[in-house]
Amino acid sequence: MTTRLDTSIETWGRVHRGAHQLAEPAWRDAVAEAARATAAAAGTTLAHGLGRSYGDSALNRDGGLVRTTGLDRLIAFDREGGILRAEVGLSIDALLRVTVPAGWFVPVTPGTKFVTLGGAVANDVHGKNHHVAGSVGRHVRRLALWRSDRGVVECDPEVESDLFSATIGGLGLTGIMLWVEIALHPIRSAMMQVENRRFADLDEFFALSEDSADWPYTVAWVDTIQGGEALGRGVFSRGRHAETGGLEPHRSGGPTMPINAPSLLLNRVTVGAFNRLYHANPGSAFRGRRHYDGFFYPLDRLRRWNRLYGARGFYQWQGVVPPADARTATRTLLDVITRSGEASFLAVLKNFGDRPSPGLLSFPMAGTTLALDFPNRGERTLALMAELDRVVSQAGGRLYPAKDGRIPAAAFQLGYPSWRELERLRDPLLMSDFWRRVAISDGNGG
Amino acid sequence: MAEATRILILGATSAIAERWARLRAARGDRLLLAARDPAKLAIVADDLRARGASEVLTAESDLGDADGAAERFSAFADRLGGVDIVLLAYGVLGDQADMQANTDHLRAMLDTNFTSAVIWSELAAGHLEQAGSGTLAVIASVAGDRGRRTNYAYGATKAGLSVYLEGLAHRFAGTPVSVLCVKPGFVDTPMTAHVAKGGPLWATPDMVAADIDRAIARRRTVIYTPWFWRLIMLIIRHLPRPIFNRLNI
Ligand SMILES: Cc1cc2nc3c(=O)[nH]c(=O)nc-3n(C[C@H](O)[C@H](O)[C@H](O)COP(=O)(O)OP(=O)(O)OC[C@H]3O[C@@H](n4cnc5c(N)ncnc54)[C@H](O)[C@@H]3O)c2cc1C
Ligand SMILES: NC(=O)c1ccc[n+]([C@@H]2O[C@H](COP(=O)([O-])OP(=O)(O)OC[C@H]3O[C@@H](n4cnc5c(N)ncnc54)[C@H](OP(=O)(O)O)[C@@H]3O)[C@@H](O)[C@H]2O)c1
C-alpha cells in the first residue's frame, strides 16, 4: 500500500494542522494494509473522512491517517424498503443524488452534505429532526469494522452489541468502519414546506419549540450581540418534506472561497451588521417551499467557507444542557457571550428530544443545545469558552467533541462518564489528537 | 422507453472508468465489465447495480495479454448481445528509472499500454464497423504529447496509442462510428497515490468521467481533460529545446 507524508491536513476550524503518514485505500480489503502501513512509523493511525470536524478528533498528528473517501461505493440499495448498505467514504452529497430520485432521504443529516457515512456514525451526528428521529445511530442497522486485533467484525444491536454501541459516536477509535447499513426516510418530494418566524427573546424560542412538536425539522438562529432586553432574539425555522414537487436531487457547483480572508473580516461590527440584516430580512419571516439543498445546507453554497475566518482559523463550541436547567443555563450562556464582546457569526439553538441513541459516547441528550463559532483570538477566545464550559458542566450537560479542539480532559470526562469503556474497547492501533488530550494524558485537565 | 445502451468497459476497475460507469448506470444502461481482479470486479458491479444499471455482467480477463483477443472480444460482445460503446481504460504507469534498468519491465509496460490496447481497439473498431454505428473511447494521456525524461516510456505508449486512434478516427470519418482519444492531465486516482495532491492542476476522476461522457455524446475525436491541458500541452509542445531541456518535468 502506497503511503505518503502529508502536511496539509487540518481541522475544519483550521486551528490545528499537522503532518500525517497518509494512505487512501480504494478498496475495502486494502484498509488493513493501509492502517498498518500508516501506523508503521509512529505506532498509531486513524480513519479520516471529509475532515468536516471542526476540532481535532479527526487528526492524529505525527502518526498515521487513513482517508476513506476512495471507499464510496454502494453495496446494496433496496429501493422498496429504503435500506442502503454502502462503503463508509460515501458522502451524503453523493448518497442523496442516488436516493432522492428513488424517493428516499437520509434519516438524519448534519448542516453540511459534505460528510462521509463513516464520519457521521463516528460522531453520531444529529440534525434538525433530533426531537423526532434522534441521532443517526438509531438508524444504523449494521456495520462492519476492521480492527487490528480481530480483523473484520460485523456488528449490530444484537451481534457484538458492545462494539456496535461503542462504535456509534466512538470517535473513530473502535476500529476502521468499512461499510454501514442504514434505514432511509421516505419522501415524496425534494421540496420542503418551510416556515420562518422571528422571536424576540428566549421565552418565545421555548414556546415556539413546544408549539412545533409536529414539525419534523426545527432549528433557530440567535443573535449573540444584543444583550439586555433583546437577549436571545432570533429567527425560528421549521420545515417538513413537501408532498409534491418532484424528486430532483441537488446540483453540484457553486463558488469556492479561494484564499484566506483577512483575519479582521468577521468582527463584532460586521457580525452585528449581519445579525441586524438577518433579523430584519424578509427571509426571516419566510413561509413557502424550498428545495432540501437550500433548507438543510445553506453553508454548502460557498465551498471552503471556513477560509472566511482568516489564517488563524476559528473555534466551534457546542454544548447541550438538560431540560430542567435549560432556560436558565441557555440565558446564562448567551449573557456570557454578549458581555464578552466576542461575536459569534453563526449561533444555532435547538431543543433535542429524548429519543435515546445506541451510542456509548453519543453527544445528544434531551435538552437544549447551543452551537457557536468564534474567530480564534487566542487566550481571550479560550477564556470565553472555558466560562461557557463551566455553565454546561454545572447544569449537568456536555460538549460536542466534533466541534471542539480544546475541551479539557476533566470537562470531557465529567460529561461522558462512559469514556473508560470506550478506552477499553479502543483498537490499540488507533489514536487521535482529541483522545490523547482527553483520555490518555493524566486526566487532570493539563 | 429507449433500449438500454450496451457498454463494454475494458479495465472497469480503473478509478476513471468506474466513475464514468456510474453515470451510465444511473441511466439504466447495460454493462459488461472486464478486468483482471475478480474481487474488485464484484465490488464495482454491486455498486453499479445499486445505482440503477439494468444489467451488469463481469468478465475476469488479463487485458494486458492480447493472446486470443479476437475470440475473447467476440465472447464479450456475444454476452452483451452487441456493443454500442467500448471504453478502454486500463493502463499502468511504470517506474521510469526501473524500466531504464530492467527492459523486461519496460516490455511488460509496452505490452499493456500499447500492444494490447491497440489490438483491443482494432477489434472494437471492427465490431462497430460491422454493427454500423457506435463509439470507441480510449484513455491515452497528455504524457503522450511530448517525451520527457521523467516518463518517456509511458509517454511513448500513450503517443503511439493516440496516433493509432487518430488513424481509426480518420478511417471512420463521416460514418456513424466515432472514435475518441481521451487525454487526461493529473488525476487523483490509485495510479498517482504516491504523489502529493492539491493545487489547481489536479482533477478528480469524477470530473474526467463527466468530460468523457460529454465527449462521447458530442462525438468528439480528441479531448484534453480538464480542458486547460490543451493549452498547457500546446505550450509544452512548442517550447524551444534549449528551454525545454532546462525544465525538470
Ligand atoms: C457546516 C457544518 C455543519 C455541521 N452541522 C452539524 C450538525 O448539524 N450536527 C452534527 O452532529 N454535526 C455537524 N457537523 C459536524 C460533522 O457532521 C461531523 O464532524 C462529521 O463527523 C464530519 O464527517 P467527516 O466525514 O468529515 O469526518 P471527519 O471529520 O473526517 O472524521 C470525524 C470522525 O469520524 C471518524 N471516522 C471517519 N471515518 C471513519 C471510519 N470509516 N471508521 C471509523 N471512524 C471514522 C474519524 O476518525 C473522526 O473521529 C457540521 C460540520 C460542518 C462543517
Ligand atoms: N491518473 C492519472 O493521472 C492519469 C493521467 C493520464 C492518463 N491516465 C490513464 O487513465 C487510465 C485509467 O487509470 P486510472 O487513473 O483510473 O488509474 P487506476 O485506477 O490505477 O486504473 C488502472 C487500471 O488498469 C488496470 N490494469 C492494469 N494492468 C492490467 C491488465 N494487465 N489487465 C487488466 N487490467 C489492468 C488496473 O487493474 P488492477 O486494479 O487489477 O491493477 C486498474 O484497474 C490509464 O490508462 C492511465 O494511463 C491516468
Image (cartoon, grey):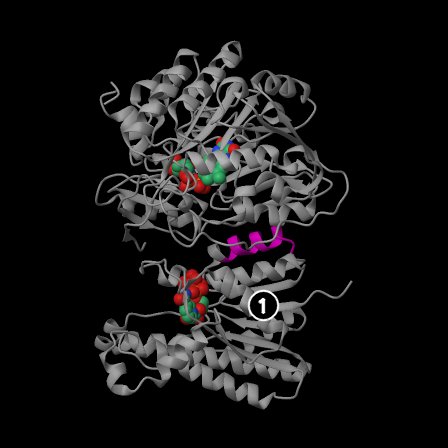
Looking at the rendering, the stretch of residues picked out in magenta corresponds to: B41-52
- Comparing B92 with A285, the one in front is A285
Q: In which quarter of the image is residue B201?
A: bottom left
Q: Label 1 amino acid? A: Asp
- Comparing A341 with A309, the one in front is A341
- Comparing A50 with A263, the one in front is A263
The majority secondary structure of the magenta stretch comes to helix
In the picture shown, does residue A76 fall above or below A355? below
Identify the residue at image location x=58%, y=32%: A279
Residue A156 in view: no
Residue B71 location, x and y as percent? Answer: 55, 77
- Comparing B140 with B198, the one in front is B198
Identify the residue at image location x=64%, y=84%: B129
Residue B145 location, x and y as percent? Answer: 39, 81
Q: Does the magenta stretch include residue A193?
A: no
Quadrant occupied by the C terminus of chain B: bottom left
- What residue is shown with label 1? B213
In the displayed structure image, the side of residue A58 where residue B209 appears, left or right: right
In the picture shown, does residue A85 fall above or below B207? above
- Disc 1 is placed on an element classified as helix
